[in-house]
C-alpha cells in the first residue's frame, strides 16, 4: 500500500538511467550524460545519456521494424488490452517509486505526484478497453451490387515529445492510446525529467510489450528532439510543449508530411460571476493558478471577475494563496513545490517585475520563498491588470494570476477570447443560462463549469487556435493515431466497361 507518513529523503547519490531501444536498456557508455539536480533541493539526483544521432536512428529503425512486421498491430485487441492492463498493474506496484522520481526531477509535491501516477493507472485501464472496441464503419446502403467498409488502421511509427511539467502524466495521456491503436513509439522526454519515461518503457517491456514497440531516446530538444521531428521514417508526431517548438514541428512535418498532434501553450480564463458560490470559486481559482506552481498548460492565469464583487473576491483569492503551503516537495504537507528549471524561474520573476513596471497592483506574493535550497516563488496576485499588459497576454507558466474586472456577460466572453490561445477555460456561476452561454462561446478545447483542472481518461484534451492541433485521450485519442481506409466490395457480376 502507498502509505507515507514521514518526509522522504534524497538519494545518497545520483541514479544513472539508460535510454531504451528494441526492448533493452542502453547505458551511457562513452556518451556524454546530462546530470539533473532536484529543483526543490539543488542536489544532483539523476543522470541520463545524451543520445547520439545514431541512437535515434536505431530507435526509429526498431520502431519501424516492430510496426512493419505487425508484431503488435497484428495482435488482436484482447491481446493488446492484456498488455495494457498488466502495465497498469505494474505501475500500481511501482507507484511510490515513480512518484518519488517525478518529484525529485520536477519539484512537484510528493502527494500530488502520487495522485498523478494514480491517474495514469486509469489511463492504461481505460485504453485497454479501447484496444478491444476500436472499430470502423460499414455502408450497407450502396445498392445490391456494392458493400462499403471503413477500417481504422494504425498510422505507424509515432514520435512522442513531452515537456517537464507533467513528465509521467502527459506521457500516459498518450502512450496507452497510441499502443491501443497498434502504433509503435519513439518517445523523447524533456532532458530535465527523463527518469519516469524510462521507467515506463521498462514496465511495458515487463508487461509483455514486444521489443521495439516502445523506445525512449534521451537528450536535448535542439539536438535529439529536432532530429526526431525531422526524421523521415516517423509517421506521426505528438508534441507537447511551447508554441515556438510547435512551429518547428509544423515546419518539420513538411519533410514527409507526417501527421501532427500538438498541445501547446495557454492563457486560460477563469470567469467568475457575482452569483457564483464565491467561497468555492476563490478556492478553485487559487488552485487553478497555484497547482503545479502554475506550470500547467491549462493553468487559469487570467481571473476575469464581475466588477461588483471584484474587490472582495480578489481578497478571498489572496487569502487562499497566502495560506497554501509552499515547501520541500518531499514533505507530505507541501501543496506548492519548486519551480522546475532555472530558466523558468528567471522567466516567472521577470514577468513579476514586468507586472510592477507596467503598473499592475501587487496584491500578494511577488517574491521568491526561501525553503533552504532549491527555487520557490510565492503565488502572486496582480490587480488593476489591463489587456495590453504582458502579464495579461503571455503564457507565464508560473504562479502569477492577473485580475481583470468585467461589467457584462458579453464583455466577459470577449475578454476571455482576447488571446491567441484556446486551451482551457472555467466559468463560475450558479446561473445555468450564463454558464451555458459562456461555455458555448468561449474558444477553448477544455471547459470547466464550477470547477477547474479536473480530467480523466474518458474526456479528450487539446486546444483551439494557437494552442494546438488534434486531441489526446478518450476514444478520440486512439482515433488520432489511426488513419481511415475505405474498402469498396463489389457483389456479384460486374457491369462491363467494354462489352
Ligand atoms: O519548452 P520546450 P521549454 C511553454 C511554457 C514554458 C515554455 C518554454 O510557456 O515557459 O514553453 O518551456 C523539446 N525540436 N510550455 O523551453 O522547449 C524539449 O526537449 C524538438 C508549455 O521547456 O517546448 C522538451 O522535451 N523538440 C507546455 C519539449 O520539447 C524540442 C509545456 C518541450 O520543451 C525542440 C512546456 C526542438 N527544436 C512548456 N526544442 C505545455 N503545453 O504544457 C525543445 N524540444
Image (tube, grey):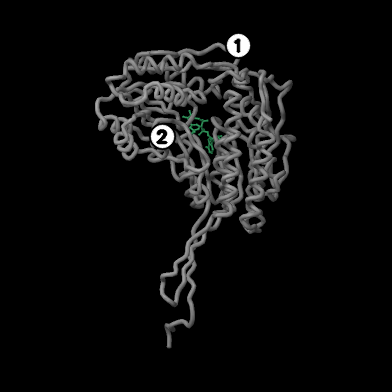
Nearer-N-terminus badge (2/1) = 1
* Residue at point 36%, 14% (across, down): 357
Q: Which residue does the image show at 35% across and 18% down from the upper left?
A: 313
Which percent across, then down, holds residue 40?
Answer: 60, 19
Say which quarter of the image contains residue 3.
top right
Left-right relation of 69 to 367? right
The residue positioned 50% from the left and 56% from the top of the image is: 483
Residue toward you, 388 or 5? 5
Give the residue pinned by disc 2: 448
Image coordinates for residue 462, horizontal then vertical, percent: 45, 41
> Considering depth in this image, is 470 or 130 the residue closer to the camera?
130
Q: Name the front one of labels 2 and 1.
A: 2
Q: Position of residue 424 (x, y in %)?
A: 41, 35
Above or below 376: residue 83: below
Q: Is residue 210 left or right of residue 361?
A: right
Residue to which mark 1 is pinned: 372
| Label 1: element kind | loop
Q: Nearer the viewer, residue 253 or 190?
A: 190
Residue 81: percent from the left, percent from the top? Answer: 63, 50
Picture layout, residue 458 above or below residue 387: below
Other-residue count near label 1 (Cα within 10 Å), few / some / many at <14 / 14–19 / ≥20:
few
Residue 198 visible in rendering: no
Circle 2: element type: strand
Mark 2 to mark 1: distance in Å?
37 Å
Question: Residue extending furthest bottom?
Answer: 499
Amino acid at each position: 500500500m502507498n502509505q507515507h507518513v514521514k518526509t522522504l529523503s534524497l538519494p545518497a547519490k545520483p541514479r544513472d538511467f539508460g535510454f531504451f531501444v528494441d526492448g533493452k536498456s542502453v547505458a551511457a557508455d562513452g556518451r556524454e550524460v546530462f546530470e539533473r539536480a532536484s529543483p526543490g533541493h539543488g542536489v544532483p539526483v539523476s543522470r541520463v545519456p545524451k543520445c547520439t544521432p545514431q541512437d535515434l536512428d536505431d530507435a526509429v529503425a526498431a520502431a519501424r521494424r516492430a510496426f512493419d512486421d505487425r508484431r503488435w498491430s497484428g495482435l488482436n485487441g484482447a491481446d493488446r488490452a492484456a498488455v495494457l492492463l498488466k502495465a497498469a498493474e505494474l505501475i500500481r506496484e511501482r507507484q511510490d517509486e515513480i512518484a518519488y522520481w517525478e518529484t525529485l526531477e520536477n519539484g512537484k509535491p510528493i502527494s500530488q505526484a502520487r495522485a498523478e501516477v494514480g491517474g495514469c493507472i486509469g489511463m492504461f485501464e481505460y485504453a485497454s478497453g479501447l484496444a478491444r472496441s476500436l472499430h470502423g464503419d460499414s455502408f450497407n446502403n450502396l445498392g445490391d451490387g456494392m458493400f462499403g467498409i471503413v477500417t481504422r488502421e494504425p498510422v505507424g511509427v509515432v514520435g512522442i515529445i513531452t515537456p517537464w511539467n507533467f513528465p509521467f502524466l502527459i506521457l500516459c495521456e498518450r502512450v496507452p492510446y497510441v499502443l491501443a491503436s497498434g502504433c509503435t513509439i519513439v518517445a523523447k522526454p524533456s532532458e530535465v525529467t527523463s527518469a519516469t519515461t524510462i521507467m515506463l518503457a521498462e514496465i511495458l517491456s515487463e508487461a509483455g510489450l514486444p521489443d521495439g514497440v516502445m523506445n525512449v531516446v534521451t537528450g536535448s530538444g535542439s539536438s535529439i528532439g529536432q532530429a526526431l521531428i525531422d526524421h523521415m521514417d516517423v509517421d506521426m508526431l505528438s508534441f507537447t510543449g511551447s508554441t515556438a517548438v510547435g512551429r518547428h514541428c509544423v515546419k518539420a512535418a513538411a519533410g514527409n508530411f507526417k501527421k501532427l498532434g500538438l498541445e501547446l501553450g495557454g492563457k486560460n480564463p477563469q470567469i467568475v460571476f457575482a452569483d457564483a458560490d464565491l467561497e468555492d470559486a476563490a478556492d478553485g481559482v487559487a488552485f487553478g493558478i497555484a497547482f503545479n506552481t502554475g506550470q500547467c498548460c491549462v493553468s487559469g492565469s487570467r481571473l476575469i471577475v464581475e466588477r461588483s464583487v471584484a474587490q472582495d473576491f480578489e481578497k478571498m483569492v489572496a487569502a487562499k494563496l497566502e495560506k497554501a503551503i509552499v515547501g520541500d516537495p518531499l514533505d507530505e504537507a507541501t501543496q506548492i513545490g519548486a519551480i522546475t528549471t532555472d530558466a523558468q524561474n528567471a522567466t516567472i520573476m521577470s514577468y513579476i517585475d514586468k507586472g510592477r513596471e507596467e503598473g499592475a497592483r501587487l496584491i500578494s506574493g511577488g517574491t521568491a520563498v526561501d525553503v533552504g535550497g532549491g527555487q520557490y516563488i510565492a503565488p502572486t496576485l496582480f490587480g488593476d491588470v489591463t489587456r495590453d499588459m504582458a502579464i495579461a497576454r503571455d503564457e507565464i507558466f508560473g504562479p502569477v494570476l492577473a485580475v481583470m474586472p468585467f461589467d457584462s456577460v458579453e464583455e466577459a466572453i470577449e475578454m476571455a477570447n482576447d488571446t491567441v490561445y484556446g486551451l482551457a477555460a472555467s466559468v463560475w456561476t450558479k446561473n445555468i443560462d450564463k454558464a451555458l452561454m459562456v461555455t458555448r462561446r468561449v474558444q477553448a478545447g477544455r471547459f470547466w463549469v464550477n470547477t477547474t483542472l479536473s480530467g480523466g481518461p474518458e474526456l479528450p484534451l487539446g486546444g483551439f487556435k494557437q494552442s494546438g492541433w488534434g486531441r489526446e485521450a478518450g476514444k478520440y485519442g486512439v482515433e488520432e493515431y489511426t488513419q481511415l481506409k475505405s474498402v469498396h466490395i463489389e457483389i456479384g457480376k460486374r457491369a462491363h466497361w467494354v462489352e
